[in-house]
Image: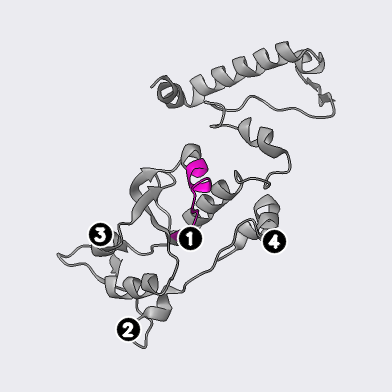
Amino acid sequence: MFPGTLGAGVVGRALERGIWSYSTVNIRDFALNNYGSVDDEQFGGGAGMVMRPDVLGGAIDSIKNRGKIIYFSPRGAQFNQKMAREFANSPDATYTLLCGRYEGIDQRIIDEYDITELSIGDYILSGGEIATQVFIDSTVRVMDNVLGGGQESAENESFEIGGLEWPLYTRPSVWRGRNVPEVLLSGHHGNIERWRKQQSDEITKQRRPDLIKENDK
């Protein structure tokens, strides 16, 4: 599953250039039986299997430089762009990203290793691998020298500007009878900036009013 999409695009090129690196640990390698079992039934009953602490503990202990351990879970704090920058700019940006499966992992693992729980959204995935790739992609792309457009390219995106991004246009100026807004062709930078701010505010108000509330805090 790795690098998957992380091996392509700007993040893939950053991987090739050594700006970031990763290694994988196969949890099944630490299974305690010949079947490679990593899960068991829940104490107290209930549907779904739980990943065992003795198996996960062995896998985690095998990692010499673990840094902060992050587990992707629906009950975790909502991951956002601000967090991506904080994780990217940490003095020791080394992380162990735990990809859960089944119903989840034994709580004692979370307590034992003081694991940080994060969620990438209010929905359920089959496992934590996709969430891990989302975390890595969004974190790596804000590191220095990753984006081709430089720092300005990253700063003008949705969530970086305090709301959602304005509409974007490129050549041709007329396509299927649809024109690029005249203000963008005017060359008047002040008017362009005001138009973009107005468009961003309107789109954010319509689609993500919660972002306006957050910015008012």
Depth check: give the residue in front, 136 or 4: 136
Q: Earlier in the sequence, mark 2 or mark 4?
A: 4
Q: Nearer the viewer, mark 3 or mark 2?
A: 3
For the residue marked with disc 4, what is the amino acid? Glu
Depth check: give the residue in front, 35 or 139: 139
Q: Earlier in the sequence, mark 1 or mark 3?
A: 3
Q: Which residue is labeled 2 in the image?
A: 32
Q: Residues within 10 Å of mark 4 (few under 14, many from 20)?
A: few
Residue 16, disc:
4
Residue 129, disc:
1
Q: Magenta span has 105?
A: no
Q: Is residue 216 above or below residue 75?
A: above
Q: Residue at x 56, y 22 (%)?
A: 203
Colour pattern: one colour
The picture places residue 64, in percent across and down from the top left corner, at: 43, 71
Q: Earlier in the sequence, mark 3 or mark 2?
A: 2
Depth check: give the residue in front, 173 or 217: 217
Q: Earlier in the sequence, mark 1 or mark 2?
A: 2
Q: CA distance from mark 3 to mark 2?
A: 22 Å
Find the magenta span and give its range.
84-96
Q: CA distance from mark 1 to mark 2?
A: 23 Å
Among the 4 quarters of the image, the one containing residue 189:
top right
Q: Earlier in the sequence, mark 4 or mark 1?
A: 4
For the residue marked with disc 2, what is the amino acid? Leu
Q: Earlier in the sequence, mark 3 or mark 4?
A: 4
* 79 left or right of 8 in image: left
